[in-house]
Amino acid sequence: METAVNTPAPVNGVTYKSTGGDSDLTGGNSLNDTFDMFLKLLTTQLKYQDPLDPTDNNEFVNQLTQFSQTEAAIGTNTKLDSLIALQNNSQLSSALDYVGKEVRADSIVLNLEDDGSDIIYALSGNSDKTEIKIIDSTGETVRTLQGSKTSGQHEIHWDGKDADGNTLENGLYGFAVVATDKDGQTIQTAQGIQGTVTGIQLNSGQVVLNMGEVEIPITSVQAIIQKPTTTTGST
């Protein structure tokens, strides 16, 4: 049976593989054991070297120095891994405040639920035509919504139905906001979604918020929406 190989997140752009435990490259005991073996090999090399052409003593010193430097460098990497893990845990703890809150975030993907999905978009100028195209997993446009023509930020609700009025299955859909002026020139747009954060995770060192099935990098969040509180009066 093959040993499972885990691929940790890259550190400073460098990806490495680890089999786990103290026997891997970053394990604390690995280099200690290897250092003993290195000394045995060095002693054997001295014993069997050609007496008429001995190896320069400086070469042995260089070998020992290089090995010690490598050992120290990997020890430093181990400490850096620990610091990165602590930093990641701190980021996750901070992101817990997002869970249960409604946010707006940049996205080209939306999550269709039973009550539909809310789309946020902005126009850099007034348009002659604004369309929001809903795209399924096969790349087909299943619905085209007519959006606002005035510049600024807008919202639109998709009820989850296709162009024929059929209710589509819940899940992930893509969408694209296309706006043009009276001359047919494209107007610059921005698009995103609004929804409730249902969970958080760490992906390649980056905190990601879950909005249903949609994964949103925390850096893509544009706003947190305060839901109005309902109060009940006494009778």
Image (spheres, rainbow, N blue to C red):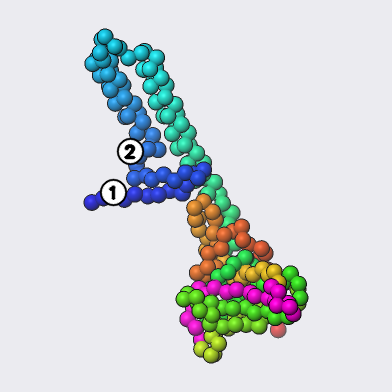
Location of residue 42 in the rendering, given as x and y in whole percent from the top left corner: 30, 20
Query: What stretch of residues is rendered in magenta?
Result: 167-186
Residue type at tag 1: Thr
Location of residue 84 in the rendering, given as x and y in whole percent from the top left corner: 51, 44
- In the rendered structure, does residue 224 fall within the stretch colored magenta? no
**Farthest-out residue, front:** 183
Q: Name the residue carrying label 2.
A: 23
Mark 1 surroundings: few (<14), some (14-19) or many (≥20) residues within 10 A? few
- Left or right: residue 2 compared with residue 151: left
Tell me if residue 113 can be seen: no
Residue 52, quarter of picture: top left
Identify the residue at image location x=47%, y=41%.
81
Distance from the alpha carbon under mark 2 to that under mark 1: 12 Å
Identify the residue at image location x=61%, y=76%.
118
- Left or right: residue 118 compared with residue 88: right
Q: Nearer the viewer, residue 207 or 182?
A: 182
Mark 2 surroundings: few (<14), some (14-19) or many (≥20) residues within 10 A? some
Identify the residue at image location x=71%, y=74%.
185
Element under disc 2 = loop
For residue 167, above or below residue 173: below
Question: Which image quarter holds the C terminus?
Answer: bottom right
Location of residue 104 in the rendering, given as x and y in whole percent from the top left corner: 64, 67
Q: Nearer the viewer, residue 62 or 211?
A: 62
Label for residue 3? Answer: 1
Element under disc 1 = loop
- Left or right: residue 65 compared with residue 19: right
- Left or right: residue 20 compared with residue 93: left
Residue type at tag 2: Ser
Location of residue 145 in the rendering, given as x and y in whole percent from the top left corner: 62, 82
Mark 2 or mark 1: name the one nearer the start of the chain.
1
